[in-house]
Image (tube, rainbow, N blue to C red):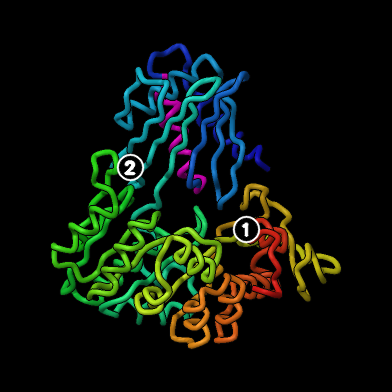
Amino acid sequence: MNNDLAARFQQAISTLDPRKPEYVMHVVDRLLDQAISAGASDVHLQPGSEGLEVRWRIDGVLRPVAVLAAAIAPNIVARLKVMAGLLTYRTDVPQEGRIAGTTATSIERRVSTFPTLHGERVAIRLFADIGKYQALGELGLPVKIEQRLRAMLQETTGALLIVGPAGSGKTTTLYACLREVIVHSRGERSVVSLEDPIEQALPGVAQSQVNAASGFDLARALKSLMRQDPEVIAIGEIRDPDSASTAFEAALTGQLVVSTFHAGSAAESIGRLLDLGLEPYVLRSGLRAVLHQRLVRRLCTCSEPLNDPTDWLGLPVGQASGPVGCPVCLGTGYHGRMLLTEWLELMNPSVTRAILERADVPSIEQAAMAGGMETRWSMALNAVEAGQTSPAEVRRVLGLGNPTCG
């Protein structure tokens, strides 16, 4: 029922008069308000020959909403650029800016424009409301992993990595970790962060935004930050060999480093760090733990059991349910999302041995599983059999990997 979204948006703008000069301004306001109300994380405005296609990303999936007339498309984009403090006369280069939250909503928005054949494309990230997902206990982590994560955040040295693909909630978890450090230490630890961009203001954390264009890149910022007497360093994302090397140098010299990192699994993050040039002994000594996470959509209460679910979509499940669709879930069959996680600590001798031998990712994962790590696939299959999500959703998020091998 994508039509539900379209109907709601059309109703929201139906009372506006296109002849009035403030028409575009009100269309943009209602577009953003409706997206927030629908729980969207991103708004995409795609210019084409037929007009400006509007799509919202809800629970990780893009949903078509409307096609605005081509005649007003440039004005819609220009209005967003004004709100974000961008240059309206530059339509030939990408630009990035932010729209601050208002008294009506605390949600900030990041605006990115990009020139295309039919005009400027706009992507708007709607940052999570600052009142949501503040504490670790609100993330939906498995109890054992949440307990180990809390204990790890009390350590004074070493690196904790939060890994996953884009859109898996890594930054949300990173912020929750920082709040946990501040609350548990009662403000008695020096906590700093380097981010690109800063998504939320965190009381008790000295936050800085890196700017590679001005020479203030992550590696240089980290080296300078070491002179600021930090105890806990949060890094928005490790992206290159220099930042990886500097981050682990800090982790080995008396700071707790918490960072995000793009990787498809906990074991893959170790393989990628080795590929970035980190020596195995540095990983063995500096890396404390890896939290890998993915987000899958939860089935709505309108779901129905699948007939003969065994080996459904190649997943060896005994029972499973599938999406149906109702007004509550806007016809998708899903409502909200849940975490699938892996927790890998470098306390297992077989894991550290695999790292020192520069073993491949499957070998590292097998060693971790032998040491008791529950894989993302295991958690996914349990969620399917519990009726929390569907086999199709698991395949959409985790791909066509082998669930029997992690």
- Residue drawn 60% across the image and 59% down it: 297
- Residue drawn 45% across the image and 26% down it: 27
Residue at the far top: name it: 19
> Can residue 405 be seen from the camera position used here?
yes
How many neighbours does mark 1 have within 10 angstroms: few (below 14), some (14-19), or many (20 or more)? some
Q: Earlier in the sequence, mark 2 or mark 1?
A: 2
Q: Quadrant of residue 321?
A: bottom right
What is the secondary structure assignment of the residue under circle 2?
Answer: loop
Percent position (x, y) of residue 282? 37, 74
* Residue nearest the viewer, comparing 337 with 252: 252
Residue at the far right: name it: 308
Q: Is residue 24 rendered magenta in the image?
A: yes
Percent position (x, y) of residue 119? 50, 21
| Mark in the foreground, 2 or 1 | 1
The kind of secondary structure the magenta stretch mainly shows is: helix
Q: Is residue 313 left or right of residue 90?
A: right
- Residue drawn 23% across the image and 74% down it: 253
Residue 194 to residue 45: above or below: below
Q: Which residues are magenta?
A: 23-39
Q: Is residue 234 left or right of residue 138?
A: left
* Residue that carries the numbered disc 2 in the rendered image: 104
* Residue that carries the numbered disc 1 in the rendered image: 397
* Residue nearest the viewer, comparing 400 with 180: 400
What is the secondary structure assignment of the residue under circle 1?
Answer: helix
Percent position (x, y) of residue 3? 66, 37
Quadrant that contains the C terminus: bottom right
Q: The residue under label 1 is which amino acid type? A: Val
Q: Is residue 3 left or right of residue 358?
A: right
